[in-house]
């Protein structure tokens, strides 16, 4: 049953890499974008703190 | 109307409200699309189960063209009305569109091998899609190549607009040239010629890919706007 599902009538070797790579690319894109946002937010905050210190 | 959303501060406020909705829509619609596509849709009478690659291949290809068209509109708005948020939106879209283009090519290759007997063929549809990938990569390289961000934006916006000629070529390539790639079966005159049991998972995945794009786009635009604030703050530190 499960074996049949994974085998996909002989096309499993083509179907699962398609879905797998799509998932990986989309998740990596999402995670790097979120990380970039967090980094920028942190940088801006530290800059604002340091300019407040000066004035 | 447009100007109300185009104000960066107001945009940031709206974005933080809309973003979780896009996240949930992506997860729920994508989950439903995957369930229907993998468990609850029939195998094709000619292609067997390999037809299931369609549910990731076709939405990726649609989004590749949708993202590029959005970029072209944003680039035009940025060039004509000098609107800073339009340039930011174009820059934020490019990496997402490049990912979708890569996925369309990659999954297409995995579908082509069992169905056509080859991973790749230099036919019009595949070649114009590869050109689209290079347009994305060229744009990304150019927009980041200048020390002065405004000059990079101008040059890269012109590149996007010139490259837009490729989008109708991709769309109509399967009609203009008779090749291995099959012609359109969803977006065409006279309505879709594909059964509802396959159309539903396809449309659910397409909508999920669209909400995913908007989700990541909002994150990247927010990061870009904050990046611009960082640049201004650093200039103030140096000159102040």
Image (cartoon, coloured by chain):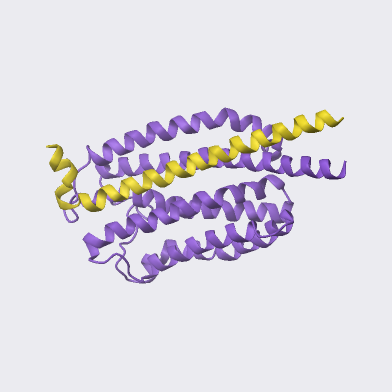
Which x, y percent locates residue B201?
A: 31, 41
Which x, y percent locates residue A35?
A: 55, 38
User: Which of the pair B195/A6 is nearer the observer?
Assistant: A6
The chain assigned the colour yellow in the figure is A
The quadrant of the picture occupied by the C terminus of chain B is top right
What residue is drawn where x is 36% and y is 70%?
A: B123
Up the image or down, B103 lies above or below B232; here it is: below
User: Which of the pair B145/A8 is nearer the observer?
Assistant: B145
Q: Is residue B191 visible?
A: no
What residue is drawn where x is 59% and y is 37%?
A: A37
Which x, y percent locates residue B14?
A: 62, 31
Up the image or down, A33 lies above or below A14; here it is: above
The quadrant of the picture occupied by the N terminus of chain B is top right
What residue is drawn where x is 53% and y is 60%?
A: B137
The chain assigned the colour purple in the figure is B
Image quadrant where residue B228 sits: top right
Q: Is residue B28 left or right of residue A50?
A: left
């Amino acid at each position: 049953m499960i074996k049949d599902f994974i085998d996909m009538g002989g096309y499993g070797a083509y179907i699962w890499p398609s879905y797998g790579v799509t998932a990986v690319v989309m998740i990596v894109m999402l995670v790097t974008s979120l990380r970039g946002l967090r980094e920028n937010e942190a940088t801006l905050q530290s800059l604002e703190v340091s300019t407040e210190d000066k004035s | 109307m447009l100007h109300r959303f185009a104000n960066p501060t107001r945009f940031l406020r709206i974005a933080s409200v809309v973003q979780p909705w896009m996240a949930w829509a992506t997860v729920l619609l994508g989950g439903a699309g995957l369930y229907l596509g993998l468990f609850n849709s029939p195998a094709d009478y000619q292609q067997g189960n390999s037809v299931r690659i369609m549910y990731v291949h076709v939405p990726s290809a649609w989004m590749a063209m949708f993202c590029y068209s959005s970029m072209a509109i944003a680039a035009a708005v940025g060039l004509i009305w000098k609107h800073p948020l339009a340039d930011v939106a174009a820059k934020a879209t490019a990496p997402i569109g490049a990912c979708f283009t890569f996925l369309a090519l990659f999954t297409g290759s995995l579908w082509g091998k069992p169905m056509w007997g080859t991973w790749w063929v230099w036919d019009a549809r595949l070649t114009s899609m590869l050109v689209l990938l290079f347009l994305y990569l060229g744009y990304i390289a150019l927009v980041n190549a200048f020390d002065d961000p405004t000059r990079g934006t101008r040059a890269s916006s012109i590149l996007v607009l010139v490259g837009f000629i490729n989008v109708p070529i991709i769309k109509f390539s399967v009609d203009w040239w008779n090749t291995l790639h099959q012609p359109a079966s969803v977006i065409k005159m006279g309505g879709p010629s594909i059964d509802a049991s396959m159309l539903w998972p396809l449309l659910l995945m397409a909508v999920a890919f669209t909400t995913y794009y908007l989700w990541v786009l909002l994150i990247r635009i927010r990061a870009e706007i904050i990046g611009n604030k960082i640049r201004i703050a650093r200039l103030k530190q140096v000159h102040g």
